[in-house]
Image (tube, rainbow, N blue to C red):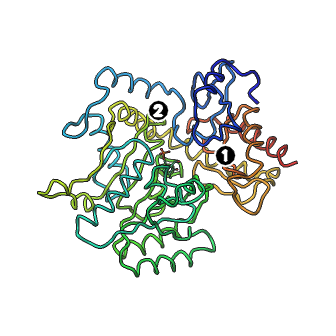
Amino acid sequence: MIEAVSELAQRDARVMWHPYTQMQLDPQALPIVRGEGTLLFDEQGRSYIDAISSWWVNLHGHAHPHIVQAISDQARQLEQVIFAGFTHEPAIRLAERLLSILPPGLSRIFYSDDGSTAVEVALKMALQYWQNLGGKRTRILAFEGGYHGDTFGAMAAGRGLFSAPFDRYLFQVNQLPFPMAGAEERAIATLRAELQRGDVAALIYEPLLQGAGGMRMISAVAMAEVLSLARSQGVLLIADEVMTGFGRTGRLFASQTLGVNPDLICLSKGITGGFMPLGVTAASEQVYNAFLSQERLRMFIHGHSFTANPLACAAANASLDLLLQDETLRAISRIGAAHAAFLKRDNTSFAKNIRLCGTVMAFEVASTEGHSYTHALRDRLYQGFLAQRVLLRPLGNTLYVLPPYCISDAELQMVYAAIESVVKEAIE
Ligand SMILES: Cc1ncc(COP(=O)(O)O)c(C=O)c1O
């Protein structure tokens, strides 16, 4: 689809190793020189609608002037300072603001670098919490099909295709069935059996929506039931809202829809509006208190060089300014309504297992068998969309749309039109 190979693309192909890319089959990356709003521009000035928010990070559009200004002002003031023994206003303000909008019960903010590190921090906090209390709870539970990142702890919690080459090096995490329709009873029964052993430290979950596992959506009631049972036995609940946070599922956080408040929550991706890498793990006062001691080594043993980077915090504060405006909250509902209207059209019969959650729409293409990450249709779809100047990156035969909130109605219609034509051509 990328016609003439540009000089930039050639230089890239000589030196680069791209993520989640089979470099032998897909050596050619598309150079992007500029972004504005929903659009990405290539070297020839052609625009692409970023319908997946650049791996689910962008909220308000590319190069949004308000966030650009905040980062630039902050860079002139203070670009970075060690966060052990030192602090700064953007980090404090962001922590205060996050705690005012997060589900109740969370009172402490720990910064890290990205979604995976936010998860590592939560897992380590949960494990050290029980160790500090002198207890015997040492095991983590997670859900089948979950994805929590690519570092070792996160992979241990999110076993599957993405962790497979490393499984033998990962610590034991027991998997519960994801309580989708038909699996609720099995999930509860498996959890009961696990709880009987009395050593479960924490349960990690993606509330409402498993992202990388195939955009699998779930009833809030079924999930809440499983979580409440775990909580009733003292298990710490870790909500991984790296993908679902900041409005993606309709509410600011998916945990609000679940109605079960976690002990720890992991945030990243949209937190900075997609401008800068930043991870956050918010903890309850109960978790935090277990680390207070006259013994220094009961402190939380974790930290990164760029913890609470001021530029990232400034970007996050600016993104929150935009997110909390009525206009943005209205846009979130508008996108959900547009998705629903599209899915009701007669000519979307190629869409199987249709699901919708807030601004995220997903379905399987041409297969009632469900999701397969290595499905042969994937490349045809991906390339077909790029040819129509739409960035959609199917998870195998699972097609999803997860746009920035600034996407216009006209752009949404262009995305839907591309889906109709590309999918039809691919399955013919
Ligand atoms: C639910 C969830 N947790 C964690 C991660 C890892 O985040 P990152 O890629 O920023 O390390 C992801 C990434 O897709 C995710 O979807």
Which residue is depicted at the point 68% across and 46% down?
A: 394
Q: Depth check: 43 or 97 in front?
A: 43
**What amino acid is at disc 1?**
Ala
Q: In x, y percent, where is residue 174?
A: 48, 69
**What amino acid is at disc 2?**
Phe
**To which residue does mark 2 refer?**
275
Q: Left of 77 or right of it: where is 254? A: right
> What label sits on residue 110 in the rendered view?
none
Q: Depth check: 291 or 14 in front?
A: 14
Q: In x, y percent, where is residue 16?
A: 58, 30
The quarter of the picture where residue 104 lies is bottom left
Residue furthest to the front in view is 168
Secondary element at tag 1: helix
Image depth: mark 1 or mark 2 in front: 2
Q: Depth check: 331 or 182 in front?
A: 182
Marks 1/2: CA–CA distance: 26 Å
